[in-house]
């Protein structure tokens, strides 16, 4: 993978994270569901330094994984 495609992938991931966080804040998506999506789908695509920022969310998801979400 070349440098420009790595930057593009990072920017795409960053944009998805921001959009998902905004949806949580605005109440468009349930907080737990949003946390799960962030952890499961997005945080693994980041570099090791950025993953550390997600540790609190990983903890939340781990402690609430048997909670039902949605309807």
Image (spheres, helix red, strand yellow):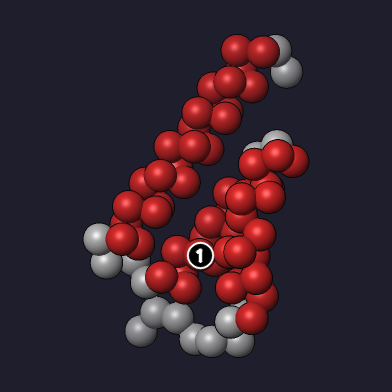
Q: Position of residue 57 (x, y in %)?
A: 58, 64
| 5 and 31: which is toward the camera | 31
Q: Where is residue 43 in the image (x, y as percent from the top left)?
A: 62, 49
Q: State whether residue 2 is above or below residue 53.
A: above
Q: State whether residue 45 is above or below residue 32.
A: above
Horizontally, is 69 left or right of 56 in the view?
left
Badge 1 crowding class, 10 Å Cα cut-off, few under 14, some 14 to 19, many 20 or more, is many
Q: Quadrant of the C terminus?
A: bottom left
Q: Can residue 50 be seen in this view?
A: yes
Q: Which residue is drawn at 67% across and 13% down?
A: 3
Q: Can residue 40 be seen in this view?
A: no
Q: Mark 1 points at which residue?
A: 35
Q: Residue at x 54, y 22 (%)?
A: 8
Q: In which quarter of the image is the N terminus?
A: top right
Q: Residue at x 58, y 20 (%)?
A: 7
Horizontally, is 52 left or right of 29 in the view?
right
Horizontally, is 1 left or right of 14 in the view?
right
Element type where label 1 sits in the image: helix
Q: Residue at x 49, y 37 (%)?
A: 14
Q: Position of residue 38 (x, y in %)?
A: 53, 56
Q: Quadrant of residue 4?
A: top right
Q: Position of residue 17 (x, y in %)?
A: 46, 46
Q: In which quarter of the image is residue 23?
A: bottom left
Horizontally, is 70 left or right of 1 in the view?
left
């Amino acid at each position: 993978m070349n440098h420009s495609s790595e930057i593009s992938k990072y920017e795409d991931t960053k944009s998805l994270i921001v959009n998902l966080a905004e949806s949580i804040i605005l109440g468009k998506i349930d907080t737990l569901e949003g946390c799960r999506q962030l952890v499961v789908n997005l945080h693994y695509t980041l570099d090791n330094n950025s993953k550390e920022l997600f540790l609190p969310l990983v903890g939340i998801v781990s402690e609430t994984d048997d909670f039902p979400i949605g309807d």
